[in-house]
Image (tube, helix red, strand yellow):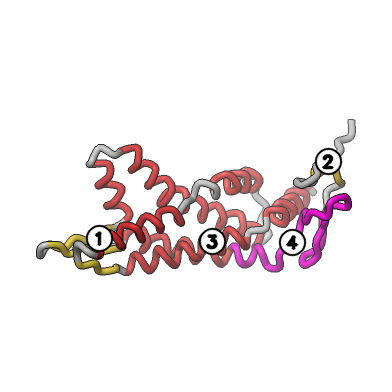
Amino acid sequence: MSRIELDACAECDLLLNPAQPAVGDKAQCPRCGYLLQRPRKQSIERTFALSVAGLILILPANLLPLVGIKLLGNTRDGTLWSGVATLYQEDMWAVAILVFLSSILFPLVNIALSLLVSGHLYFRKPNRYLPRWMRWLQHIEEWAMLEVYTLGIIVACVKLASMAELRFGFGLYAFVALLIVNAMLASSLDQHLFWRCIEQLRHKNSL
């Protein structure tokens, strides 16, 4: 039995033949005009470059001090890791795990998967795990919440500013740069184009 592949319009649920517009063109639903696909130019190249930049930034963002606090003559620097460790030692292990997952592990896995997928597509190297990596990437990017953690840092700095002397470390600048790179990474990754290129690589490998 032959297999028929159809796409559904996200706005009006009209079933359509899969659209494959060229890069720069766009495909719209013929019934409601909803924008179905608009392949972005150089999406693979930008994603690959941003993934490399993110992988470089994630080391200083996690390991170098974000904020130094001077209170009553005592100075203490804080990093992402020390924040997680302090929460755990204070028996707030659920919050510690949440902060670790959303601010360290998931962003790291998100960047690593982006690098793996875009790198294979950029160098046109087939890999049987590409579809699986792409599915993981689509799921995990929803859990990387650097923006939420950044908001928490800003709120903490505002509250502490009246009580102690604050000193911003290089880790904070790396963290802000990582946040920007992560946002650009999410906006540059064209999932339709990536899936199409993965399918082309799989077809090429099966020939």
> Disc 3 and disc 4: Cα gap in Å?
18 Å
Circle 2 or circle 3, nearest the eye: 3
* Label 2 CA crowd tier, 10 Å (few <14, some 14–19, many 20+): few
Main secondary structure type of the part rendered in magenta: loop
Of marks 2 and 4, which one's residue comes earlier in the chain? 2
What residue sits right under mark 4 in the picture? 39
Amino acid type at circle 1 is Leu
> Disc 1 and disc 3: Cα gap in Å?
28 Å
* Label 3 CA crowd tier, 10 Å (few <14, some 14–19, many 20+): some
User: Which residue appears at 37% of the width and 55% of the height?
Assistant: 152
What residue sits right under mark 3 in the picture? 183
Q: Marks 3 and 2: in contact by CB < 8 Å?
A: no
Of marks 2 and 3, which one's residue comes earlier in the chain? 2
Amino acid type at circle 3 is Ala
Picture quarter with the N terminus: top right
Amino acid type at circle 4 is Pro
* Image spot of residue 101 (x, y percent): 42, 45
Q: Secondary structure at mark 3?
A: helix
User: Which residue appears at 35% of the width and 37% of the height?
Assistant: 94
Q: Is residue 44 left or right of residue 71?
A: right
122, above or below 141, in the image: below
* Image spot of residue 27 (x, y percent): 82, 57
> Disc 2 and disc 3: Cα gap in Å?
32 Å
Q: Marks 4 and 3: in contact by CB < 8 Å?
A: no
* Image spot of residue 98 (x, y percent): 39, 43
Q: Which mark is residue 5?
A: 2
